Amino acid sequence: MSIINGVTRLIPGTLGDINSLVSESHNNGLLEYPQYTRPAKFRGMEVPGILLSGNHKEINDWREREMIKRTSDRRNDLILSKDFKNAPVSKRIKGDKNDSMRFRIGNGYDIHQLVKGRDLIIGGVKLSHPDNIGLDGHSDADVLSHAIMDALLGALSLGDIGKYFPPTDEKWKNADSLVLLSKVVELVKNQGWEITNIDSVIVAERPKFKPHIELMKNNISKITEIDKDLIGIKATTNEKLGPEGREEGISCHAVALLEQK
Ligand SMILES: [Zn+2]
């Protein structure tokens, strides 16, 4: 049986190709008979260690995982199709929920200098600083929007905002960063991903952020088209330490989780 299985796989156009010998040809029915298991090496190919383990449960689990992997490698359309997503869970290929590659995480960071004669715009909200200073930059220097954009781009390895909105381009001078964010969100969607959630922290000594957080969430929620509850915006002081503590600038960190549609 296993010989026939092996031979048919070696004939092109039959049950599989030579590579499939490694993962597919180990006949399930023969697992009960360890004397039929293959040697550690077969035609120069390493036989996966799990197949030599004699642990039938683990071998079965492994075969199932390999099957899912093969399906997603060869017929990813089956897993991504709407029919599949709408199919009852019992009819789905197992592993759909556990397939970690359907999720990607991104990290973003930004800092801008605090100077006189500039507006202080964060999360699309115009704030007023007690010293009448604002953030310097080519665009409106909205650190929160910029950090979120970098987190989204980073999740998909698409580079950073400098690549899409270079500070040398006059087009983006004093640009509203929410507009830039909407372009990044569009890019993420066009790549077939949707935002699961966002979290962020603004690092600034002053002003007080608490009264403005809801408004910032509203703005980001509108642009990203995700629920307000899926957007975390926090603010912390830097305990007077470092550039943020000396009020030389304001920085922001953000993370974003994306799920493949
Ligand atoms: Zn920036």
Image (cartoon, rainbow, N blue to C red):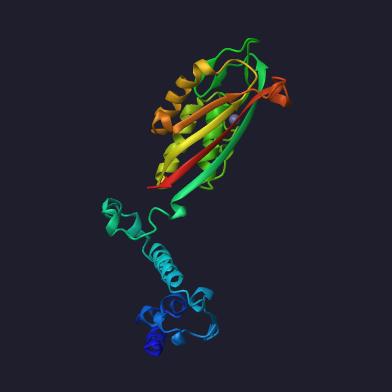
Could you tell me if residue 80 is visible in this image? yes
Could you tell me if residue 223 is visible in this image? no
| Front-lying residue, 139 or 16 | 16
Q: Using the image, determine if residue 85 lies above or below residue 73.
A: above
Q: Quadrant of the N terminus?
A: bottom left
Q: Which residue is rendered at x = 54% and y = 31% of the image?
A: 200
| Front-lying residue, 258 or 238 | 238
Residue 124, x across and y down, in percent: 49, 22
| Front-lying residue, 27 or 117 | 27
Q: Which residue is rendered at x = 48% and y = 85% of the image?
A: 38
Q: Which residue is rendered at x = 55% and y = 20% of the image?
A: 121
Q: Using the image, determine if residue 120 lies above or below residue 226.
A: above
| Front-lying residue, 91 or 145 | 91
Q: Quadrant of residue 202?
A: top right
Residue 138, x across and y down, in percent: 60, 27
Q: Using the image, determine if residue 206 lies above or below residue 110.
A: above
Residue 40, x across and y down, in percent: 54, 82
Residue 227, x across and y down, in percent: 39, 31
**Where is ligand 1, by quadrant?**
top right
- Say left or right for 203 vs 97: right
Q: Quadrant of residue 147?
A: top right
Report the number of discs: 0
